Image (tube, rainbow, N blue to C red):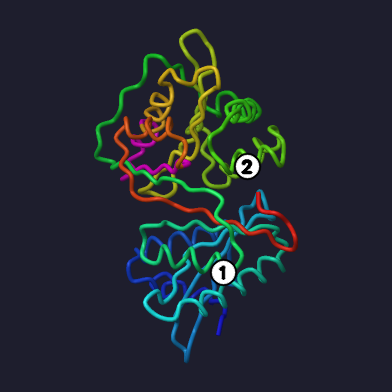
Amino acid sequence: MIRTITPNELDAFAAFAAHANSERVAAFVRDLWQRGESAPDQCLVAEVDGHTIGRMLWWRLASNPFDAYIGLLSLPWDGAWEDTGQAILARCIQDARDAGAHRLEANVLMNAPGGLERCAVLADADFIPVQEKVRLELDGDSPLPPHSSRLHVYTRAQLGDDQFIEAIEYVMQGTLDRLMARSIQHLGSREAAVDYFDLLADLDNHPDLWLLCFDTHGEFVGTVVAQRLSNSLGALNYVGVAPEQRGRGYGTDLVAEGIRRLMVTGLESVRVEVDARNRPMLAACHRNGFAEMGRTLIFGRGLDGASYV
């Protein structure tokens, strides 16, 4: 049987996967509920004779009700996970479709328990792999990188949303991020920039951590969006170098500036995910001390005839 949970079942829902940090999972889900992006009736469990044998949830960002995201998919990986996975995904797909979603996306951390099995379950439900990303992490005890003397840094709070959107549109040119390139092809550069701006703002909207960087002559160099995902974890969710500035080492400077802005807030670690084919950005992260933690495969599925872009 597949059913939704009640609010007072959150702790049990969070604790289902033995390898996970249940307190962190519960905080993540509670935060989604509080922001109105998910709800108890979007948290699904699979049961047999009253015993939970699987779980997952789905959510949507406030800025875009048409894209839904799957998370926390946990199944009996050492047993009969295929039928349970298909049943819980079918319920999720139907619920998301009924709620008006046009697309579903799921991220699979390949080196996590059940990584290959998650890929198989999603593929059987007509999800297709659309991007591979490298997940990297920097420990909060790492030395704070110095500010680059080549950069003059301004924040979104100082320059405004419109200039930041224009900057995102500009640095998107020739992007090596496959999903971003698809978005530009489908929406056009301006709409893709606005869409990405809204997506990032929904995740964490602190304009003082959104950076526009210029060289000593006032020429635009690039953007950094540094975000606090929790009280302990931060992320560099976007780093983009202006096309004419690429190949000059500015990616390393931008990553370092993002690290500096996050670390002074007392975080325990900083995470970044980079398209696996974006070798310049991977090199910039490695030069700043990031270590590879695994690879994430992103799957997408259109609903009701909509294509996944």
Residue positioned 35% across, 21% down in the render: 147
Residue positioned 69% across, 38% down in the render: 185
Residue positioned 52% across, 53% down in the render: 298
Q: In this view, does 109 lie to the left or right of 101?
A: left
Decide: is 77 above or below 272. Answer: below
Task: From the image, state whether disc 2 or disc 1 is nearer to you.
Answer: 1
Q: In this view, does 127 lie to the left or right of 9?
A: right
Between marks 2 and 1, how big is the CA–CA gap? 32 Å
- Counting residues from the start of the chain, the first of labels 2 and 1 encountered is 1
Q: In which quarter of the image is residue 285?
A: top left
In magenta, the rendered stretch is 260-275
**Helix, strand or loop status at disc 2:** helix
Q: How crowded is mark 2: few (under 14 residues within 10 Å), some or many (20 or more)?
A: some
* Residue 217 is covered by the magenta coloring: no
Q: Residue 241 carries which label?
A: none
Q: What residue type is labelled 2?
A: Asp
Q: In which quarter of the image is the N terminus?
A: bottom right
Answer yes or no: is residue 180 visible.
yes
Q: Number of labelled discs?
A: 2
**Helix, strand or loop status at disc 1:** helix
Decide: is 168 above or below 6. Answer: above
Q: Nearer the viewer, residue 276 or 30?
A: 276
Answer yes or no: is residue 37 visible.
no
Q: Nearer the viewer, residue 208 or 134?
A: 134
Q: Quadrant of residue 287?
A: top left
Percent position of residue 232, x then y: 35, 48
Q: Residue 124 carries which label?
A: 1
Percent position of residue 197, x then y: 61, 38
Name the residue tied to disc 2.
198
Name the outermost residue toward the bottom.
49
Q: Which amino acid does label 1 sit on?
A: Asp
